[in-house]
Amino acid sequence: MTDRRRTPMNSRIAAVHLADVPAGLEPVEGTAARIGVPVADLLRTPDGTRDRQLVYGEPVTVYEDRQGWSFLQAAKDSYVGYVPGTALTAPFEATHWVSAPATHSYSADDFKSPETQALSHGSRVQVLGGAGRFLETDLGFIPACHLLPLGAHAADPVAVAELFLGTPYLWGGNSRFGIDCSGLVQAALLACGTACPGDSNMQEAELGEPAPDTDYQRGDLLFWKGHVAMVRDAETLIHANAHDMAVAIEAIGTAIKRIQAQGDGPVTGHKRLA
């Protein structure tokens, strides 16, 4: 059974590479684009529920433009959905990504100059020049210390997750401006060069190998029905959660007891990444 979240097909079209496409759907090749706004909601249907989010510069494949909405598939995790066509820009050659929790682009290579854009961790930009404190990009001037070249990765996903401490909880969120549990895990792993799907049930099914119940090691993932957290050490974890309505650090035992007491059940999985 196909998973509609990662199947580029709707009631009118289907990606030409798909097998077993229902009769009556138009096969389409898709065209390359990038996200052209700081954060775009990826909706289940036009004007519908937010499933995930995409940040500036993320590459996508657009399969349909209709009535102001673009039906597309994200390159980072194959998630499909709808964004307003105005949220897209033509493909460009991204060279760097935002490795800081968030940053600004400026109108000049001067921190006192007017800012032109706010960008989240993970955004992708094209560096055009500069070798000092600021690099000139397609959006303006960005502090060099906030950027890494594409292909350069962070070393520790837990340290990346800690960059998001205090970020407001947002269901389906994928940015420093608002993030949920699976969005936090995905951001941390992608920053370290590890492929990661978008939702917690996908992550539980596809990431890592089962680990002993009480042998908690840094970087392990703990799963509940509809929730995921990342282990910091033998005693604590970090997660985006609706209890704190933010990314927070919590004692592992406390979290396990609290989540079960609030009716969300026991831990369903403990996975260790290679």
Image (cartoon, helix red, strand yellow):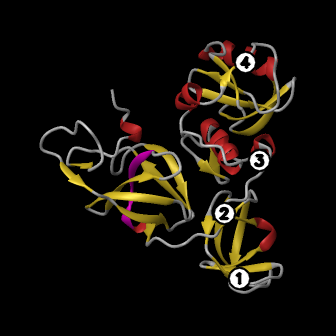
Disc 2 marks which residue? 150
**SS at mark 2?**
loop
Q: Nearer the viewer, mark 3 or mark 4?
A: 4
Q: Nearer the viewer, mark 1 or mark 4?
A: 4
- The residue at 65%/17% (across/down) is 262
Q: Are marks 1 and 4 in contact (CB under 8 Å)?
A: no
Q: Earlier in the sequence, mark 3 or mark 4?
A: 3
- The residue at 83%/82% (across/down) is 132
Q: Hey, what amino acid is under mark 4?
A: Ala
Query: In the figure, 198 relative to 261: above or below?
Result: below
Disc 1 marks which residue? 114
Region of the chain picked out in magenta, as a range = 79-85
Residue 211's disc number = 4
**SS at mark 3?**
helix
Q: Is residue 241 magenta?
A: no
| Residue 169 visible in the picture | no
Residue 160's disc number = 3
In the image, taking residue 242 as reference, residue 101 lies left or right, namely: right
